[in-house]
Amino acid sequence: MAKTITIDPVTRLEGHGKITICLNDAGDVDRAFFQVPELRGFEAFCVGRQAEDMPQITSRICGVCPTAHHMAATRALDDLFQVTPPPAAHAIRKLFYNLFMFEDHLLNFYYLGGPDFIVGPDAPAADRNILGVIQTVGVATATKVIEIRNRCRDLMAWMGGKVVHPVLGLPGGVSKAITEEKRQELRGFASDAVAFAGFTLDTFHSIVLDNPTHVALIGSENYFERTNYMGLVDAQNRVDFYEQDVRVVDDEGREIERFAPRDYASVIAEHVEPWTYIKFPYLRKRGWLGFRGGAGSSLVRVAPLGRLNAAEGMQTPRAQEEHDRLYATLGGKPAHHTLAWHWARLVEVMQAAETVQQLAKAPELTDPHIRNLDLKTPTSGVGIVEAPRGMLVHHYETDANGVVTAANLLVATLFNSAAICMSIEKAARGLIKGGRVEDGMLNRVEMAFRAYDPCFSCATHHLPGHMALTVQVRAASGETVVVVTRDDEGRETRTPAPVARPPAARSECRRT
Amino acid sequence: MTVKPKVAFYWCASCGGCEETVVDLGARVLDVVAAVDIVFWPCALDFKTADLAALADGAISVAFVNGAVRTSEQAHMAELLRRKAACVIAFGACACHGGIPALANLTSRERILQRSYHASPTVDNPAGTEPRESTTIDGHRLNLPAFADTVHKLSDVIAVDYSMPGCPPTPDNLWQAVNLILTGKLPPRGAVLGSVKSLCSSCPRNDSRPDDPTIPKIRRLIDVVVDPATCLLAQGLVCMGPATRDGCGARCIEGNMPCTGCYGPAADVQDQGARMVSALGTILQNDAGDQGTAALDDPAGTFYRYTMAASLLGAERKDV
């Protein structure tokens, strides 16, 4: 008799990601579904709005990564109005953006995915959180994390007006210049940021890489998926969060696409399923081949390891060193290890910090000429940036007055959503045999998607918390066979009777 | 032992920015946790509807609810919290006035589905598939919540005791509210927990505002390089300051951009957009004529950016 396992909701995720795992008659995993139950309609209600309002309106797609949407929209406006921002404006935007990547990635490492490794995947769930991290790395370190993040966000607030929903992006430039005084503050911050990134890497090495159990876990087949990879690269094919071309490599690391943002729709297509509001992007030339990886797959993965795989290297020296170490450890490039997303994220933390350091010294940074008003009559514009959680596309069409007539937004979560289904399925397959739900299964399944960065779990960006879960094993008739719950203190209990379902919330890094 | 007041946080249709405000309390969040019992907070704590339902009616002292309301599930949760909480605070622009998600009231459910699943340059959907409330695949049933026509502000769905506008409200705003709660100094029910003045009253550019500003025409941000010191209205830009409640710290102005009105209507203002139109009417030169407002290409989205669910326009739409 076929059974269904539902994980609903996945709560420490901000909002609602619902996981349904279908078993076959033998009780082994047949298929996994990751459902996103919300749609807000940004693409429709951006129509009729003034194009220059897009950076502020679309930042409301996500309050945790508003800067990514703000910047993608701003890049799209440059393209729409065919305007080149002055050097100072580019420098300010890039600096702002790298500050954002730095603080967002760090938060992930210390609060979200990191605890699985820093504290340990088999540690009691009650310790597997930021409090456990503090115990492991010490209060002094935890204070440093909070302090460096506060300084980063204060600088961002000064530059962008607000941290949550910034206002600096305009077609052809930015709204506010940088003073010499602020440059000095940025320089001081940057050297501390680079030092902190180095400290964080050292911590990762000593706690994770020096531990054979953890290394084996990263290499485990349960967390291994061969797909294509995609990310922004500079002219030398190095990882860049802000520009310029998109590069796609296959599962062997061969370049199969390299395109300018404007050509995105000729390379990427989206598949619609009736059971979720999220869409599933794939490589148009290969066609929709379903939820499968391996050679010839049409799926692409994005975000830290996807970006590193899609590039040939990093832009800064210490990030490059760490990049080389990562691939030497994982056995070459591309690496298909889902849990190595965490490591790649730290490589990017270093690049972000080093980039801030470089830009803080750039002579053009404090040039007061921050806006080019030589705007052409608009028709269509595309902007692509690398959000912390992967490639983000904003595409607007307008009338001659710059009023939006059509919008298309491809958010990072979309690109990884099919792979997330597959990763969950694989992890579940390794743990569920003959209909038996193993103890400890819950965290192992969580780890399969947490690696992608809690795009749907920014809630854990917020407070130390546990992921409360309910797993229902249901017969095809709908009758609940067994329920496994884990409370917020990490206690797992099993009951034969059905329990009331927790309320559903919404999805994170949201569907637009 | 004194029983600590029970507090709940919940979200409806929102972006997570209001949750960031709680986190950005920084070390002060520890004081909050020490002073109250947080009994329900989906983003951070284990929770079940059953747990909430099991509380006695009115057992929660204060429930902070952010986000607009679009689905039946959100309405259901709002109603449940209303029963369980002695006091409900609409937290943030979306709960107070609809916020950015309520711009969807300017379009329709059909157009949203059309745009998302059919008329996109990337969607390849020859079978015309759309997400459905219930789908059966290989004998497995998968459900999705329904997607409603209209976005509502919280007070359309339940009685709201206090409002705290802002997109998002600042940590200082929240901290002040928490102190009012803990010291029992909340104002009479129905009040907005915030300033009674308009943003212009605290604008750092007040000194540069002419006593009697006049402008020949309204200009868009694509037409001007914004001067970093002068009153934005005097530069011809639509700065929502005159119609908007103070309390944000003029953050956008500090970023050298006009106020877009996220704190909603000022204390003496019924309809934020109407007040702003009126304010512009007084500063546009008498002989400006149609040219004066020719650049206003999106009046609804400009004047009601965050208040569509609370505006006269929004109310009319719902009756259609």
Image (spheres, helix red, strand yellow):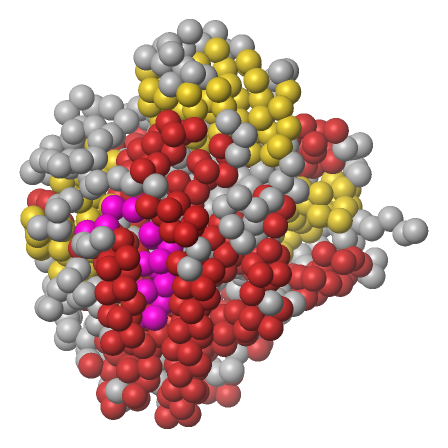
- Do we see residue B132 in this rendering? no
The image quadrant of residue B86 is: top right
Name the residue located 41 percent from the left edge and 52 percent from the top edge: A212
For this orientation, the residue located farthest to the front is A212
Q: Main secondary structure of the magenta part?
A: helix
Question: Residue B15: image x %, image y %?
Answer: 46, 50
Between B32 and B178, the one nearer to me in the picture: B32
Classify residue A340 as left or right of residue A133: left
Classify residue A405 as left or right of residue A303: left
Name the residue located 58 percent from the left edge and 38 percent from the top edge: A468
Name the residue located 11 percent from the left edge and 32 percent from the top edge: A287
- Do we see residue A330 in this rendering? yes
| Above or below for A57 versus A13 | below
Between A262 and A500, the one nearer to me in the picture: A500
Name the residue located 27 percent from the left edge and 53 percent from the top edge: A330
Q: Is residue B16 magenta?
A: no
| Above or below for A30 versus A305 | above
| Above or below for A12 versus A271 | below
Question: Residue B114: image x %, image y %?
Answer: 25, 32
Question: Residue A370: image x %, image y %?
Answer: 26, 81
Q: Where does the magenta region start and end?
A: A334-351
Between A384 and A377, the one nearer to me in the picture: A384
Between B190 and A272, the one nearer to me in the picture: A272
Question: Residue A467: image x %, image y %?
Answer: 56, 41
For this orientation, the residue located farthest to the bottom is A180
Classify residue A469 as left or right of residue A416: right
